[in-house]
Structures are given as C-alpha cells and as structure tokens.
Image: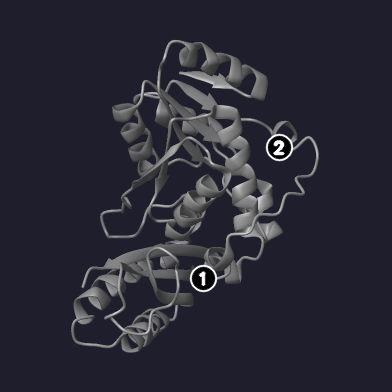
Amino acid sequence: MELYTTIASIKEALEIGRSKGFTIGFVPTMGALHIGHLSLVEEAGKLCDIVVVSIFVNPTQFNDPNDLANYPRTLESDMKLLSPIRCDCVFAPTVGEMYPDPDQRKFDFGNLERVMEGRFRPGHFNGVAQIVSKLFDIIRPNKAFFGQKDFQQLAIINELVRQKGYPVEIIPCPIVRENDGLAMSSRNRLLLPQYRECAPLIYITLLEAKKLSSKKSVEEIREYVVDQINGSNLLEVEYFDIVDDRYLTSIENWSTSGGKIGCIAVFAGKVRLIDNIIFDL
C-alpha cells in the first residue's frame, strides 16, 4: 500500500497499471474509516486489479462550518485499518492540492438535489459533484464503490456519471450496521454516550415501519416513524420521507409503481445521522 498526496504522483502510478490493462477500483472516502468503508474496499478488491482509496474531507460539501471543523480527521489510524486488506493506493491530498482555485462549477440534478438532504443542506450535493468529478478525472476508475446508506448521494452520483459520460461503473454496496442496528458512520464516534445508547431506535423504528406497511397507509407510516423517534426525547427527526427509488419523489400510496425507500435524518444531540430502508411491497 502506497500513500500519494499529489495529483501528479497518483496519476503517474495508476498510468503504469492502466498501461498493463489492469482494472482500477475506486473507493472515495472522507476518512475516519470504519468497517463499512472497509467492506467497500474489500468488494473493490474482489472485482478489480488495483484498489484506490481516497481520503479527503471535502470542504465544498459542508454547509455548516462547525460540521466541517468537527469532522474527524484520522489519517494515521485510517492507514492502519487499511493495511490488513487489499488496498494498493491511498490518495490523501490537501485542500490546496484539490482546490488551487475556487471551484465555481454549478451542477443541475433537478429534483434529486432539492429533496431530503438537498432541502436541509443547501449546496451539499453541488459540493459532492465537484469533488467526485475531480476524483474521477484524476483516478479514472473502471468501477467506483459507494455505500447505500447515502442513498440520495448514490442517486446523485449515478446522474453525474450519466450527465458527464464517465466510463465508470457505479457499484452500490449494502449498509453495514453495528451489532445493535445503528448504521455505521464516521459521525458515530462523535456521539455522547447517552445518544449512542439511544441511536439504535432509528433502525428499530424503520424495521417496524416496514412490517406495518402492509396494514398502514404511506402517510400513517410517515407519522409513525416521526412520532416513535421523537418520543425518545434524545432524538429529533429532521425529515423522514418515503420516495420512489429512482427520482426520489414522495409517494402518496403503496400502489405507486417502482421501488420505494424510506429515508431519514435524525439529530442525536448535535450529531446528524442518516439511514434508510427499502419497502419491498
């Protein structure tokens, strides 16, 4: 495993493998790695000849300066976590390396960027598109691996690839959870003990909502989830919606065609957690 901090050096290293016909698998991260990230890296190792992991806390996707300042930066421990598994290259540039000049590009993802996360985090997905497009241009992967916990982000990335015509296959990977059901996230380590103890209620409620969906309407399920989680006193729902899994449009009834997914964001104190569940009716 080699560490690269400049665009020129990672490009040079990958060009050698590319000239030999090797396939490149790419896992973009913001570091503070956990088992969920490692599962993406392992999947890349199964499907590709060269595995690249980027570690970069991207400032343009944070709409809250405090969130950016508090986001964990743990490169040394991240490298140790990656060392036992197949990871050939770690790309960990500085902000100055990635943004020598301000990125003024504006992307248009329509409804995909206006609902849920987009509604509560204005500019977030434009920042995601800025950094992912930069990384795709640098790494030029054959396959890129993203976790399904960030379901809306995954939809945005697929649309970015479509719009820009990137020759990369996007591989969605299942949510990895703690033993108590909490979706793994770099933010989990920021939870104070009382909030960490309460946080599994999010997934417990989503599972129960899935069971009840055969008996209750879409609107009743929406109300149930919000009431159950807000009833804990330590958790506060920012949004919960049930949407179609392609356009992320709110559905009104279960007879709506296509896949349906419930997406949620919850504040546990000052820490914001997201999760989702598929309603396979």
Which quarter of the rendering shows the C terminus?
bottom left
**Which quadrant of the figure has residue 137?**
top right
171 or 92: nearer the viewer: 171
At label 2, counting other C-alpha atoms closer than 10 Å, the crowd grade (few under 14, some 14-19, many 20 or more) is: few
Residue furthest out toward the right = 101
Of circles 1 and 2, the one toward us is 1
- The answer to whether 130 is drawn above or below residue 213 in the figure is above
**Secondary structure type for disc 1:** loop
* Residue shown at the point (21%, 81%) measured from the top left: 212
Mark with earlier residue (1, 2): 2
Residue for badge 1: 116
- The answer to whether 93 is drawn above or below residue 245 in the figure is above
Which quarter of the rendering shows the N terminus?
top left
Residue for badge 2: 95
74 displayed left or right of 95: left
- The answer to whether 141 is drawn above or below residue 29 in the figure is above
244 or 237: nearer the viewer: 244
- Dot 2 amino acid type: Val
113 displayed left or right of 179: right
**Which quadrant of the figure has residue 242?**
bottom left
Q: Are marks 1 and 2 in contact (CB under 8 Å)?
A: no
Q: CA distance from mark 1 to mark 2?
A: 28 Å
- Dot 1 amino acid type: Met
**Secondary structure type for disc 2:** helix
* Residue shown at the point (41%, 69%) measured from the top left: 263
Residue 230: image location, x then y, percent: 42, 82
